[in-house]
Structures are given as structure tokens and as C-alpha cells.
């Protein structure tokens, strides 16, 4: 019988051992990591599956986006370490929730949105709605990516007002 190779066997993934790692903040805002006696300054955390598994499969990268390590789950770390990493991920993945769609206008291949979020009114543009308006989970949750890479979320499209739904409906696949 042939032995089967898992995709994880093929990938050169250097999983971090939480018992040998210590994350800490330097210069008030920069996340760093001490691992096996070596210090990695100004690291970034990048979610492999930001919508489905936001606390699992997190890449630890240097400032040039070179992957150093991979975290299986934040839950493997102490509460203090997990909280520190969660705070940095929250900043990186800042996603205002859309509460109201005031207007969506098309012009020269762009969509221009005027919205109200949980952080107040915002305006943004996006190009190519088919790639930048994404249905997540069961299709009720929507993530919108603007031209600057910012994310906006509609938590449940079925709970939107009928006027708001009419504005976004033509762009939902």
C-alpha cells in the first residue's frame, strides 16, 4: 500500500513552540519575539485564514514579510501572551462594521461608498466588486476591501434595511 503524504509534510512550516517563545512590545508599539535565546525585532502577525479561523494559523513575519515561524493557535499560549498577540492582530485587521449604506455610486470603473460604521461616517472607493466584495460563512456576512486595502464588514446582510440592501444587492454574487 502506498503511503500518503500530507500537505503539511510538503510545506516547510516552522511551527513555534509556545513554551520557548515570549512576545513583547518595544518602543511603545512594535511587537518583538524572543525565541530560543534569539530576538526578532519589529515582527508582524499575519492571519492565514482571517475570516474562518482568526485565532489559528498565524504567520510570524519579519518587516520584509519573510515568514519566520507559524503559530497553530493563540490558545496554545498563556492568556497574557495570547492577549498581546490579539491586540496586535486587532490593529492590523481593523474592520469597521457597516451600520448603514448611505450611497454607492459608480464612476470610471470604481464604486464609491458613503457609509456609517460603528466608528462613524466613512467614504471609500473600490475597484472590481467581484473580487473586493466577498460573502463569508453562509453568505450573510460580507467583507468589502477598498482600494487602500482597508476592510469593512456587514455582519448580516439579512438584517439590513431594505433600502441598504437594494444599494448593495447588484454587487453581491
Image: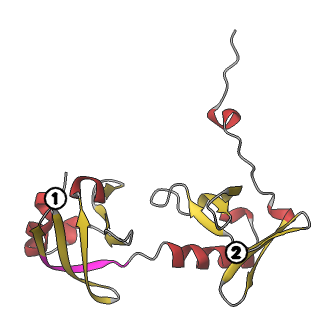
Main SS, magenta residues:
strand
Q: Label 1 near label 2: C-beta < 8 Å? A: no
Determine which residue is flagged by label 1.
Answer: 171
Percent across and percent down for residue 36 are: 90, 63
Q: In the drawing, does residue 32 fall left or right of residue 133?
A: right
At 55% from the left and 55% from the top, the residue drawn is 48
At 63% from the left and 63% from the top, the residue drawn is 64
At 66% from the left and 62% from the top, the residue drawn is 61
Element marked by disc 1: helix
Q: Is residue 12 magenta?
A: no
Label 1 environment density (alpha carbons within 10 Å; few <14, some 14–19, many ≥20): some
Of the pair 109 and 25, the residue shown nearer to us: 109
Q: In the drawing, does residue 61 fall left or right of residue 140?
A: right
Residue at the right extreme of this rendering: 37
Of the pair 86 and 69, the residue shown nearer to us: 69
Label 2 environment density (alpha carbons within 10 Å; few <14, some 14–19, many ≥20): some
Percent across and percent down for residue 5 are: 67, 25
Which stretch did the figure color magenta? 96-103
Residue at the top extreme of this rendering: 1
Using the rendered view, name the quadrant where residue 87 is placed.
bottom right
Of the pair 36 and 20, the residue shown nearer to us: 36
Determine which residue is flagged by label 2.
Answer: 42
Mark found first going from the N terminus, 2 or 1: 2
Q: In the drawing, does residue 157 fall left or right of residue 2?
A: left
Determine whether 42 is above or below 66 in the image.
below
Amino acid at each position: 500500500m502506498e503511503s500518503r503524504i500530507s500537505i503539511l509534510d510538503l510545506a516547510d512550516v516552522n511551527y513555534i513552540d509556545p513554551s520557548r517563545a515570549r512576545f513583547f512590545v518595544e518602543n511603545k508599539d512594535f511587537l518583538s519575539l524572543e525565541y530560543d535565546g534569539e530576538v526578532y525585532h519589529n515582527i508582524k502577525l499575519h492571519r492565514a485564514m482571517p475570516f474562518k479561523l482568526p485565532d489559528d494559523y498565524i504567520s510570524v513575519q519579519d518587516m520584509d514579510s519573510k515568514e519566520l515561524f507559524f503559530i497553530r493557535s493563540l490558545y496554545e499560549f498563556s492568556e497574557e501572551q495570547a492577549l498581546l498577540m490579539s491586540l496586535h492582530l486587532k490593529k492590523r485587521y481593523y474592520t469597521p462594521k457597516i451600520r448603514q449604506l448611505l450611497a454607492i455610486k459608480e464612476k470610471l470603473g470604481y464604486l464609491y461608498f458613503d457609509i456609517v460604521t460603528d466608528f462613524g461616517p466613512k467614504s471609500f472607493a473600490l475597484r472590481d466588486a467581484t473580487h473586493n466584495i466577498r460573502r463569508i460563512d453562509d453568505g450573510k456576512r460580507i467583507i468589502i476591501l477598498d482600494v487602500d486595502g482597508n476592510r469593512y464588514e456587514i455582519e448580516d446582510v439579512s438584517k439590513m434595511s431594505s433600502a441598504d440592501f437594494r444599494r448593495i444587492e447588484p454587487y453581491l454574487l
